[in-house]
Image (cartoon, rainbow, N blue to C red):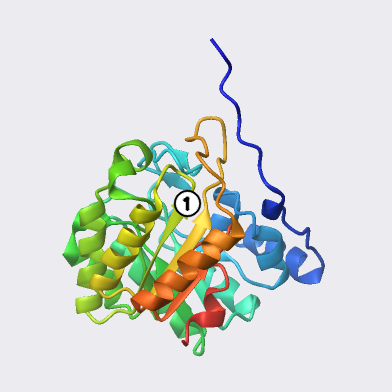
Amino acid sequence: MKNKRKITKPYWLKTKVSGGKNYISVKNIVKKYNLHTVCQEAFCPNLPECWSNNTATFMILGDICTRNCKFCDVKNAIPLKPDNDEPNRVADAVKLMKLKYVVLTSPTRDDLIDGGAKIWAKTIETIKSVNKNCKVEILIPDFKGNINDLKIVINAKPDILGHNLETAELLYPTVRQQANYKQSLNLLKSAKELGSITKTGIMLGLGETEKDVISIMNDAYKVGVSFFTLGQYLQPSKENIEVKAYITPEKFEYYKNVGMKIGFKHVESGPLVRSSYHADQYSNV
């Protein structure tokens, strides 16, 4: 039996190594306040660039997820109880970093009755209270489709509410088996109806077709999504699903043009794009 040929990572996925005072400052603040960032937990390729630009995406509610999606490298285990002081530490870190725009995310917390919604709300409110001119973008889990939990978060008035569809519906059983495509779409629809500016994104290279990608964009636009992101899936460990294809920069540009024609306010599309990448630069579009 022939060995399966491994796909070679292309040259366009190389990232620049950044450093300097800002990078060290962000690293020290994250450590000092005992915080988690999705930059670290998900091994984001843009970490050096973002930290050098004094930006980071904070991960609240711990660094352990109750789900085990095959694309994600966030730890799967029994999480610790929520830290009620965490919202204060995040807000203080935002102040120290002098941020005007902050992105929050979290692991999925199916172990909590409200999915962590109250901590989400407290964190948003505390950041805005301590940092009067700071905008807050959030990337939330699906809360098992519970709209009451969603309302708790929305009532805290985040500036942009994101929830990623991640991939094509047909790939959910292998990529995101504990989630539901239609449930995620409905969450975005409900958030829009409740007054939120919404955002979603997908990864490419998991086995989706061009028809799948355009179908997802159309689905998202129909439920009122304003911002859409597309990035290349990169296998974080041997335990995660393998990359099926590396999408060229030209194809990403093609999808950006398709998305803009569909009607999104902005489409961020490229091999190294992640949900929060350059979010502060187009949030006012």
Q: Say few, some or many: other residues with alpha carbon within 10 Å of mark 1 (under 14 / 14 to 19 / 20 or more).
A: many
Residue 146 percent across, percent down from the top left: 18, 59
Residue positioned most to the right: 20
* Residue appearing at x 26%, y 64% in the figure: 219
Please name the residue that numbered disc 1 is placed on.
204
Residue 58, relative to residue 156: is it above or below?
Answer: above
Residue 15 percent across, percent down from the top left: 72, 56
The secondary element bearing badge 1 is classed as: strand
Residue positioned most to the bottom: 133
Is residue 107 in view?
yes
Residue 172 percent across, percent down from the top left: 31, 43
Residue 252, relative to residue 196: is it above or below?
Answer: above
Residue in the foreground of this view, choosing between 202 and 186? 202
* Residue appearing at x 56%, y 22% in the figure: 4
* Residue appearing at x 29%, y 72% in the figure: 221
Amino acid marked by disc 1: Leu
* Residue appearing at x 53%, y 62% in the figure: 252
